[in-house]
Image: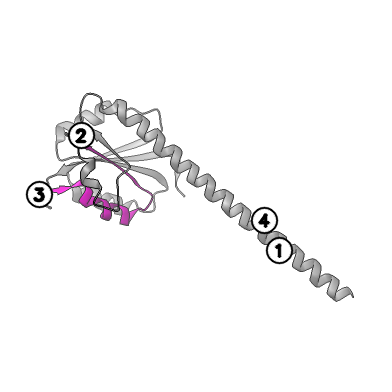
Amino acid sequence: MKSTKNITFYCVDNDTDDLDFIRENFKPNLNFNLLTFSSVQMFINKLESEEKNKNFKIVLIDNIITSRGMNTRTALELLPPIKSIDKEIEVIIFADSENIELKATASNMRPAAFIKKDSQFFIRLYPIISRLISKYNLKKKQRTVRYTIIFLISLIVFALLFLIISNYILS
């Protein structure tokens, strides 16, 4: 499981003005690294190179991305390659329109959230980030409890076997 003590945010948008705006105004109350990319290929390469990075990762990606190396692609088309690199990564899609969620119903792989890119962007973004972190930490605790229960049951079974075998040997 990854650590939520320091979160890595990847922001992908071919509009450099939007990236500058996010760099200047993105200030969640967290320890975080913000990496911005105007190219999908540069983002994918960076994500692959940080595959062993133990930080929790969140991708903020524009719905439609145009780049030189790749043709115009939607964020929904990029979800499978992103999730194949890191299954636990969360993806938040931002777009100019509000009805983008309709497009996601055809896919079995969905982003964590859709946010309209407007003056209320950060007001809506921060609670979503908090929810994703809480959800991830809950999964982490549930997994820890599961492993602890399995360990304790194994220990009890081993102790019972030891007692049965030692009683058998002594008798």
As measured in the structure, the alpha-carbon distance from the residue carrying label 3 to the one carrying label 2 is: 27 Å
Residue type at mark 4: give it: Leu
Residue at the spot of label 4: 152
Q: Secondary structure at mark 3?
A: loop
Residue at the spot of label 3: 68
Residue at the spot of label 2: 98
The residue nearer to you, when weighing 127 against 59, is: 127
Residue 58 sits in which quadrant?
top left
N-terminal of the two: label 4 or label 1?
Answer: 4
Q: Nearer the viewer, mark 3 or mark 1?
A: 1
The residue nearer to you, when weighing 52 against 107, is: 107
N-terminal of the two: label 4 or label 2?
Answer: 2
What's drawn in magenta, residue-wise? Answer: 72-94
N-terminal of the two: label 3 or label 2?
Answer: 3
The residue nearer to you, when weighing 56 against 142, is: 142
N-terminal of the two: label 1 or label 2?
Answer: 2
Q: Which residue is located at x 37 percent, y 30 percent?
A: 127
Residue type at mark 3: give it: Arg
Residue 157 is labelled as 1
Q: Nearer the viewer, mark 1 or mark 2?
A: 2
Q: Nearer the viewer, mark 3 or mark 2?
A: 2
- Examine the structure image and report whether residue 82 is included in the region drawn in magenta: yes
Residue type at mark 1: give it: Val
Question: Mark 1 near mark 2, Cβ–Cβ under 8 Å?
Answer: no
